[in-house]
Amino acid sequence: MSLLQINNLYKSFGGLSAVLDFNFHLEDGELLGLIGPNGAGKTTVFNLITGVYKPDEGNIIFSGRDITGLAPYTICQQGIARTFQNIRLFKDISVLDNVRIALHKDAPYGLLKTLLRTPGFFQGEIEINKQAHEYLQIFNLEDKAGEIASSLPYGEQRRLEIARALATKPTLLILDEPAAGMNPNETRELMDLIRWIRKDFGLSILLIEHDMSLVMGVCERIYVLDYGQVIAEGLPEEIRRNKRVIEAYLGEEVG
Ligand SMILES: Nc1ncnc2c1ncn2[C@@H]1O[C@H](COP(=O)(O)OP(=O)(O)OP(=O)(O)O)[C@@H](O)[C@H]1O
């Protein structure tokens, strides 16, 4: 059974078909890319998977459960976390608190213990603080823990957004253009980080990216969307030589 299986998905906005009979599967532990020209429907697919939009037709099965049309919070609880094309951090709070909030998803105490400030609450908070610092260390942000998130340079904000997504302890991490706005050096570091996260956290990763060096460098399999439809699927070397993909998107063979 695939970790994520999408069957016959449709989504229109007014008269525009953004996603059209989209079929897809992602296996446990896979690092998968979704590419295509601007406006092809990639982010809409991510928004459908994560519950931001409800599909007009079709279904989305994750870990054997039908998650079609569930609320984003519920889908996150089921083990899917994401980052956004336009970074969406909690901008006005600290770097550390951005990660702490994500960790509270699994806090071992509820509202009552929080209000009563029981020993369980304090023990839980100590553990969450410890874990939040560990995530920041992994992403080389530990020395920025006390800074306001929006004050970080762009590349660090992107890393923080990934750290925050990981702190919800997902089994599937969805990255929407993680290298956007990064310089070639930062992109290379990001590639290593993505590979490392997948292995060390035992995750599956699905990413949208226009940077072909990153897509071809890290993805094991790639889907290509055009006008809301899958026009190709295969290994990076198959995609880079596919005539239809070259015509619709790549323009010329990618080295
Ligand atoms: N909320 C919305 N309302 C109306 N139209 C939308 C909405 N979201 C997306 N669209 C339209 O759906 C189509 C697919 O958009 P989408 O953002 O999914 O493409 P994309 O492949 O992610 O593009 P890009 O690479 O530029 O981010 C576009 O024509 C877009 O204008």
Image (spheres, helix red, strand yellow):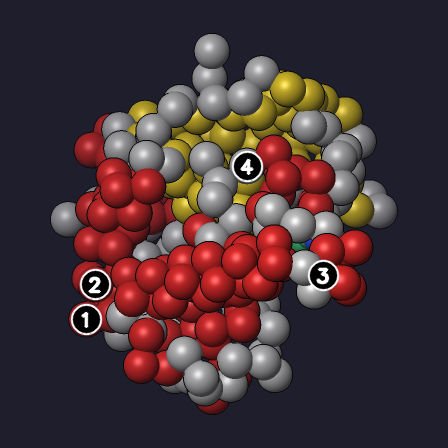
Which element carries disc 1, helix, strand or loop? helix
- Residue at image position (64%, 25%) is 60
Q: Nearer the viewer, residue 143 or 194?
A: 143
Mark 1, residues whose alpha carbon is within 10 Å: few (<14), some, or many (≥20)? few
Q: CA distance from mark 3 to mark 2?
A: 39 Å
Front disc: 1 or 3: 3
Location of residue 104 with respect to 133 vertically, above or below = above
- First in sequence, mark 4 or 2: give its number: 4
Q: Is residue 204 left or right of residue 52?
A: left
Residue 12 point in image, percent of width and height? 77, 40
Q: Which residue is mark 1?
A: 185
Q: Nearer the viewer, residue 82 or 92?
A: 92
Front disc: 4 or 2: 4
- First in sequence, mark 3 or 2: give its number: 3
The reply to whether callout 1 and callout 3 are in contact (CB within 8 Å) is no
Q: CA distance from mark 4 to mark 2?
A: 26 Å
Q: CA distance from mark 3 to mark 4?
A: 25 Å
Front disc: 3 or 4: 3
Q: For disc 4, does the CB lie below 8 Å from ligand 1?
A: no
The reply to whether callout 3 and callout 4 are in contact (CB within 8 Å) is no
Which element carries disc 2, helix, strand or loop? helix
The reply to whether callout 2 and callout 1 are in contact (CB within 8 Å) is yes
- First in sequence, mark 1 or 4: give its number: 4
Amino acid found under the numbered disc labelled 3: Thr
Residue 154 point in image, percent of width and height? 41, 78
Q: Nearer the viewer, residue 1 or 120?
A: 120
Q: Residue furthest left?
A: 255
Location of residue 63 with respect to 118 vertically, above or below = above
